[in-house]
Amino acid sequence: MEAHHYCAILNEEVIQCVIYDGNRKDAKLMGVEYIISEQLFNTLPTPEKALWHSHVHEVKSGQLVAPGIPEVAEHALMEKLVHTYGKTWHTWHTDLHKRLPLGAPQLMMGFTTDGQADPRMVAERDQRMGIDSTEKKKTRIDIVAPPIAPGADAWQQGTVIQITDPTVTAHQH
């Protein structure tokens, strides 16, 4: 899904964001993301780390963008974000339910390699916003990707954490 983040920097270690499914007047609030520094992530207990995803691929792929700010400012932001980890909860799956936020909140993870994002969706977003993700990827080649801290992106090792939806399990006998 396309996710538009509106963020507040709490301090050097923590950013909090509300996530909308677009940037139009009728956009729906679909979740929250907490973004923390690598240093703070490394202090978390192991079970907590499994809830967090790295931002390395999102930055390096050119898919994470900050439209409306000068290129030099966006590049500086990406140099900072490449060293961060996010915990994202979607509370409204607007791709499935258009009218109401139905279902259990879902823990979301970031893409970690090329080919995971729907290329059509990326191309459509790029065209609509006047962005070239491929070009952004090239301009970010100089951003050094840190190694992913142990415990992050746990879904890749088979650890999937989700809240069960009582309305779904109650009907399955």
Image (tube, grey):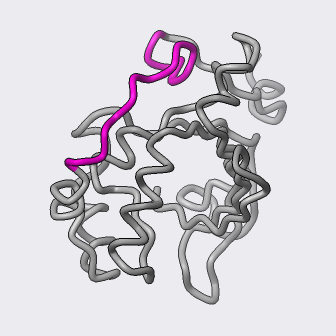
Q: Position of residue 31 (x, y in %)?
A: 70, 55
Q: Is residue 142 left or right of residue 171?
A: left
State the extent of the magenta-drawn residues as a range.
Answer: 141-157
Name the foreground residue: 136 vs 122.
136
Name the foreground residue: 90 vs 56.
56
Residue 125 lies in quadrant: bottom left
Is residue 135 found inside the magenta-colored segment of the image?
Answer: no
Q: Position of residue 128 (x, y in %)?
A: 32, 82
Q: Is residue 74 left or right of residue 49?
A: left
Q: Is residue 58 left or right of residue 92?
A: left
Q: Position of residue 12 (x, y in %)?
A: 70, 50
Q: Is residue 57 above or below residue 79?
A: above
Figure quadrant of the C terminus: top right
Residue at 70% over, 30% down = 40
Q: Is residue 83 above or below residue 70?
A: above
Residue at 66% over, 40% down = 36
Q: Is residue 62 above or below residue 145?
A: below
Residue at 46% over, 56% down = 1
Name the foreground residue: 78 vs 152.
78
* Count of labels in the image: 0
Task: Examine the residues drawn in magenta and state their main secondary structure.
Answer: loop
